[in-house]
Image (spheres, grey):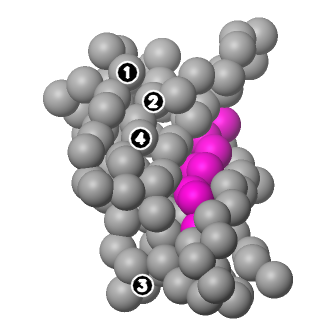
Amino acid sequence: QVQLVESGGGLAQPGGSLRLSCAASGSFFRINAVGWYRQAPGKERELVASMTSGGTTTYADSVKGRFTISRDNARKTAYLQMNSLKPEDTAVYYCTPDLIDLGGHEQGFWGQGTQVTVSS
């Protein structure tokens, strides 16, 4: 069984930084592709950052240059570094890693979400 635990959310001031973590545990070999979504109140869920199995990253225009997605398979953790935060970044953030099990099968998972609030 696989468990995902997101952490790192909280309250930040405009211009501040937060680093979200998505730690995976259980019977799998490695994190393959990974994405981070967010959903603000009254808005649709949007993809803010993604990383392919090969390491290619993509960002939403609204976060480009401010957010950085990464993964560390030694720690079985994905990250979203968020700098120069703005009030409009306020949302619940979800990680979505694709995990490869020991048999080579790939399966997608969703984290439980972590609240990020940017306010002075």
Residue 79 forms part of the magenta stretch: no
Q: Which residue is mark 2?
A: 48
Q: Are marks 1 and 2 in contact (CB under 8 Å)?
A: yes
Q: In this picture, is 93 found above or below 43? A: below
Q: Left of 96 or right of it: where is 27?
A: right
Which callout, 3 or 4, points at the residue further toward the start of the chain?
Answer: 4
Q: Position of residue 99 (x, y in %)?
A: 59, 68
Q: In this rendering, which labeled residue sits more in front, label 4 or label 1? A: 4
Q: Which residue is mark 1?
A: 60
Q: In this rendering, which labeled residue sits more in front, label 4 or label 2? A: 4
CA separation in Å, label 3 and label 4: 19 Å
Secondary-structure class at tag 1: loop
Q: Which residues are magenta?
A: 92-99
Residue under the image location 46 percent in, 54 percent down:
33
Q: Which residue is mark 3?
A: 75
Q: Which residue is mark 4?
A: 50
Residue type at numbered disc 4: Ser
Residue type at numbered disc 2: Val
Which callout, 4 or 1, points at the residue further toward the start of the chain?
Answer: 4
Which callout, 3 or 2, points at the residue further toward the start of the chain?
Answer: 2
Q: Judge by depth and name the residue closer to the eye, 1 or 101.
A: 101
